[in-house]
């Protein structure tokens, strides 16, 4: 997870601060490090350089500082207490679990939070949380639509779900999703969970195999993707069923971790892709990867979303300062900027807007 705090002083007519410091609280060396560690650090570095080389925030340079929590909630809470004491105008939280434990405190402190994913529990009521990707339940519904349009247009579909037992793994389960499954004539024939840091899910897949599913779906990230695909392979399911996966399981990092097991896996990717080099900033970022000989798997989903988040945060700060001045750059004023109807430019990375009556990214 990561948080943002700004250092500024003076009144409306005073000189702007020497720099804007953005504190990222992130899983750099913890269990999700292959997906969020080096890719996250590179996203901060790349967008910091790009913004500063193009005028900064109204002439003020931006600086990103990353703090590693190793994906531990107590460390994230401690960092929030430290940074919130600075009265930052916005913070950004990457992990759903951090949003869950901090959501009420954000409202009490009047600090808007920018997240990078969310469940029904974190998204509604919206409060002071804003999400850079569509709700996971909406992404799952889009996958179900794709199934009915492209794979099996009529007749019942048997779906098995296998997920890590944590907030992300449980984020697609709701009454609304259950009703949508019925509408699409899709039966959930198995629902299995495994401890999020276990290395083996073969027991769960033995039970799943007995239900004879047509489709498997998982909400996984980083090494969890290999765990579920190896489990499906051990149960003889990998070549027999269609495998769908949540957005953090569909990228170059997980493909690198799992090798050929990812072949044929499908899912929703609600972020820009490295292949979209007709977009100037995407080309600039891809060129940096080639020039610096970076591993291709670092240009993954978390890298793309963190670039997008940093771009929107910078845009929100710029709009707020233009409206109220540096000395009134508060959480309440940034909140007003975020809730005002806006088609965000996001440095040209991709079209972005919040869905009507929601603080979540609009799908499609």
Image (spheres, grey):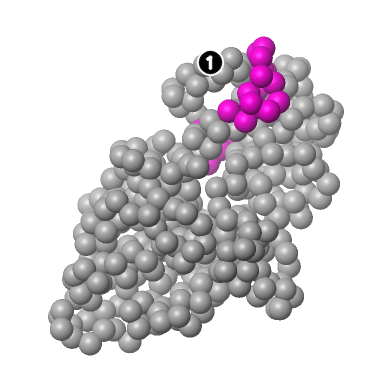
Dot 1, how many residues are within 10 Å of its Cα: few (below 14), some (14-19), or many (20+)?
Answer: few
Instruction: Indicate the position of residue 208 as horizontal and vertical percent values.
Output: 72, 23
Instruction: Indicate the position of residue 352 as horizontal and vertical percent values.
Output: 44, 53
Q: In this view of the protein, can residue 123 be seen by the observer?
A: yes
Q: Is residue 199 left or right of residue 62?
A: right
Which residue appears at 68% of the width and 58% of the height? 275
Q: Is residue 44 left or right of residue 319?
A: right
When the figure is inspected, residue 34 is found, relative to residue 176, above or below; the finding is: below
Image quadrant in which you'd find residue 315: bottom left
Instruction: Indicate the position of residue 234 as horizontal and vertical percent values.
Output: 83, 33
Q: Nearer the viewer, residue 364 or 164?
A: 364
When the figure is inspected, residue 247 is found, relative to residue 29, above or below; the finding is: above
Which residue appears at 28% of the width and 45% of the height? 127
Residue 147 magenta-drawn? yes
Q: Nearer the viewer, residue 47 or 27?
A: 47
Q: Is residue 97 left or right of residue 8?
A: right
What residue occupies the far front of the structure in this picture?
A: 278
Query: Label 1 belongs to which residue?
Result: 182
Q: Secondary structure beneath disc 1?
A: helix
Q: In this view of the protein, can residue 30 be seen by the observer?
A: no
Q: Magenta residues?
A: 145-172
Image quadrant in which you'd find residue 345: bottom left
Q: Is residue 78 left or right of residue 48?
A: left
């Amino acid at each position: 997870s990561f948080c943002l705090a700004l250092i500024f002083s003076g009144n409306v007519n005073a000189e702007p601060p020497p720099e804007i410091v953005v504190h990222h609280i992130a899983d750099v060396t913890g269990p999700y490090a292959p997906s969020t560690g080096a890719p996250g650090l590179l996203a901060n570095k790349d967008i910091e350089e790009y913004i500063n080389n193009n005028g900064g925030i109204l002439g003020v340079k931006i600086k990103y500082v990353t703090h590693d929590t190793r994906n531990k909630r107590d460390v994230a809470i401690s960092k929030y207490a430290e940074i919130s004491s600075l009265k930052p105008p916005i913070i950004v939280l990457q992990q759903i679990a951090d949003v869950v434990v901090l959501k009420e405190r954000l409202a009490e402190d009047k600090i808007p939070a920018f997240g990078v994913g969310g469940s029904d529990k974190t998204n509604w009521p919206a409060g002071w949380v804003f999400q850079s990707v569509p709700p996971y339940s909406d992404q799952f519904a889009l996958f179900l639509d794709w199934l009915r349009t492209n794979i099996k247009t009529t007749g019942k579909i048997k779906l098995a779900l296998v997920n890590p037992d944590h907030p992300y793994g449980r984020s697609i389960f709701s009454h609304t999703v259950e009703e949508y499954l019925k509408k699409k004539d899709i039966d959930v024939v198995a629902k299995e969970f495994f401890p999020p840091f276990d290395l083996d899910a073969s027991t769960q897949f033995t039970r799943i195999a007995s239900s004879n599913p047509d489709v498997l779906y998982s909400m996984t990230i980083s090494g969890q993707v290999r765990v579920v695909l190896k489990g499906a392979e051990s149960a003889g399911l990998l070549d027999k069923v269609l495998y769908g996966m949540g957005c953090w399981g569909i990228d170059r990092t997980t493909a690198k971790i799992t090798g050929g097991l990812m072949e044929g896996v499908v899912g929703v990717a609600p972020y820009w892709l490295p292949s979209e080099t007709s977009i100037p900033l995407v080309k600039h970022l891809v060129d940096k990867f080639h020039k610096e000989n970076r591993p291709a798997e670092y240009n993954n989903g978390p890298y793309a979303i963190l670039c997008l988040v940093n771009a929107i945060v910078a845009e929100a700060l710029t709009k707020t300062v233009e409206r109220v001045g540096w000395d009134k750059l508060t959480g309440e004023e940034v909140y007003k900027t975020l809730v005002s109807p806006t088609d965000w430019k996001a440095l040209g990375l991709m079209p972005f807007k919040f869905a009507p009556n929601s603080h979540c990214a609009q799908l499609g």
